[in-house]
Image (cartoon, helix red, strand yellow):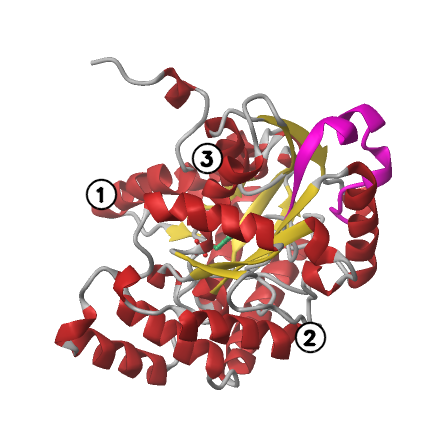
Amino acid sequence: MKIARRLELFKGYLGTEMNMRLTRMREEGRDVINLGLGDPDVTPPPHLLEVLRDAVSHPDHHHYPSFYSNRPLKEAISGWYGRRFGVQLDPHTEVIPLLGSSEGLFLIHFCLLDIGDVALVPDPSYPSYEAGVTLAGGQAETLPLLKKNSFLPDLQSIPAETAKKAKMIWLNYPNNPTGASADLAFYKKLVEWAKAHDVVVVSDNPYSEICFDCQPPSFLQAPGAKEVGVEFHSLSKSYNCCGWRTGMLVGNKDVIAGMAKIKSHSDRGMYYPMQVAATKALNGPIDFMEERNRIFRERRDVVVEGLSDIGFAVERPQATFYVWSTIPKGYTSQEFCFKVLDEANVWMIPGSMYGQFGEGYLRIALTLPAERLAEAMKRLENFCG
Ligand SMILES: *Cc1c(COP(=O)(O)O)cnc(C)c1O
């Protein structure tokens, strides 16, 4: 059979492959601690499960979703952005719900790039950005995220030539995998830069609610942001419901209209009961987030202190449920992480899986209970000791 050559241009999602491998190891009886998974053990607030159950039970709720108005959900998204960030969005022209933001952060390249167009992609970053650029026929140019710049891109160091060619720039703060945050001052500079070079800003902001002693901003809070860009957000992390596949794209109305056109062919909208539950979530109480974040903070401290005691250079992230750490000298990230998996039954993701500038690092997800994380730190200490 002849399969398209474009499939050779990008790698499949690492998580899928690793989950199969770790499942096999468990079946062989090994007590593997998986610190790779970006899907936490926390659960949605009970009132949302009830809303979803009731919505699913309704016999009329199983038609093509485009049969229903998605106005309540769009208005809920707009209301949530207004309350949380002080950003005003027209629910009809500046908001589009997505089947998880992953769907949109893949499709947006078809909206913004023609064949051969340049997209600036941070390194390290979520591998789906580059895969999306490549599949749409675009060309990804690396935007290094370096520790000396607090893992923010150095906009001034982007060559004028590259800035001129670029059609879009990807940003993701609070950041996966580095745990770094961006402040409003950075977003203001970004808007200026994007205006000067006519580049569309695409901000991916799913971790804004996983935060400790801070309130991460939205890119759209920067004056003029809507003229130059859009932002992805998602209920996955905010509302402890990664499996729901409920996300959103908001901001510039030309981009939103483009996405709506693409999506009119690629899907028929979000399952109606999910819309009902997502609407309820966005309009409802958020006090559960405080306790949830307390849990992540406690886990963060277990891991940061554990790693520091072993001698790894690690910073304490103010947001996200990831810890980004250096690895011991004498290994590549891959060598180290696979050796730890084989010998200590702990899986952490090699930084190089997120790009060449991730080499020398590893990522730990705080998606297991503190006791399990403490056990993982003990195994790591024995391994290194
Ligand atoms: C988890 C995550 C998302 C959210 O994806 P959904 O499809 O909305 O679940 C988006 N971007 C990054 C970088 C993430 O880590």
Q: Residue at x 32, y 52 (%)?
A: 31
> Is 375 above or below relative to 197?
below
Residue bearing the label numbered 3: 338
Crowd band around label 3 with a 10 angstrom C-alpha radius: few (<14), some (14–19), many (20+):
some
Which residue position holds label 1? 28
Q: CA distance from mark 1 to mark 2?
A: 52 Å
The secondary structure type at the circle numbered 3 is helix
Q: Residues within 10 Å of mark 1 (few under 14, many from 20)?
A: few
Q: x%, y% of residue 211?
A: 63, 69
**Residue at the farthest left position:** 59
Quadrant, the N terminus: top left
Tell me if residue 250 comes above or below residue 110 in the rendering: below
159 w.r.t. 123: above or below: above
214 left or right of 110 in image: right
Q: Is residue 293 magenta?
A: no
The amino acid at mark 1 is Glu
Is residue 230 visible to us here? yes
